[in-house]
Image: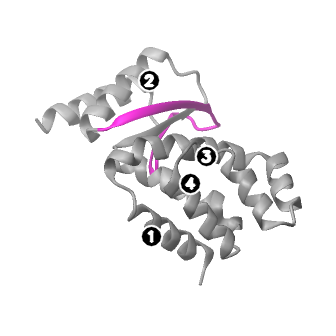
Amino acid sequence: MSQNKLVANYSNAFLNLIEKNEYKSLEENLIVLDLVLQNSDVKSVINGLDDSRKKLEFINSFINDDKKLSNFVSLLNCENRLNILCDIVTYIIKFINNENRNFEVKYASKLPIQNNDVKELNELFSKKLDANLAQVIEENDLNGLKVSIDDLNIAVKISMSDLKQRLKKHIFKNF
């Protein structure tokens, strides 16, 4: 079985145990766990521990009183699947964000992007998608603007003002 399929299977099985009202506290724990697991020093410590109980205790020390998550990590440990924990955490965080309609928007351009422009674009996309958007601004070599909303990529080679006018026209045309 491929690792992606394995991650999806474990993640979906865990998500079936979680009620929607538990998403917020679970997400908080998962974000902390994700930050910890991304750290190369922490990975070295986890990989360096020979005793699986010590690995489990170490990982559980970052989980804040969430029995379901702690038991899930214990299950992964028993099945020697801690190596996919980081991928599972990422998968579940993305699932919760999609359920709550929280998306990350990346704006990338060669030229500096004005905060007013980003704010206006965020408002337009937020209304159109009926979602909460977190913004990230990056620099790249593209002559124009590239907008990435999670997995949806939109690349345009037009000026910012032209883009804003086209978006406004398109959005208002549909109402």
Earlier residue among tags 3 and 4: 3
**Identity of the amino acid at label 4?**
Thr
Mark 4 residue element: helix
Write down the region rendered in magenta.
131-155
Q: Which residue is mark 3?
A: 63
Which residue bears the numbered disc 1?
13
170 is higher (above) or lower (below) than 159:
below
Q: Residue furthest left?
A: 175
Question: What is the distance, in whole Å, between disc 4 and disc 2 at their CAs?
Answer: 27 Å
Q: Is residue 30 left or right of residue 15?
A: right
Dot placed on the residue nearer the N-terminal end, 4 or 2: 4
Rounded to the nearest angstrom, the CA distance separating label 1 from label 2 is: 38 Å
Q: Quadrant of residue 80?
A: bottom right
Residue at the image point whose x is 49% and y is 73% from the top: 9
Check the image and tell me how it is coloured: one colour
Mark toward the start of the polypeptide (1 vs 4): 1
Q: Which residue is mark 2?
A: 118
Sequence-first disc among 3 and 2: 3
Q: Quadrant of residue 71?
A: bottom right
Looking at the rendered structure, which numbered label has been put on residue 90?
4
Left or right, 23 with reference to 110: left
| Label 3 to label 4: alpha-carbon separation | 15 Å
Viewer-side residue, 79 vs 168: 79
x and y, in percent, of residue 136 in the image = 54, 31
Report the amino acid beneath label 1: Ala
Q: Position of residue 147 (x, y in %)?
A: 46, 39
Give the secondary structure at mark 1.
Answer: helix
Q: Main secondary structure of the magenta part?
A: strand
Q: Depth-wise, is mark 3 or mark 1 nearer the camera?
A: 3
Residue 146 screen position, x and y as percent: 50, 39
Q: Secondary structure at mark 2?
A: helix
Residue kind at label 3, given as amino acid type? Ile
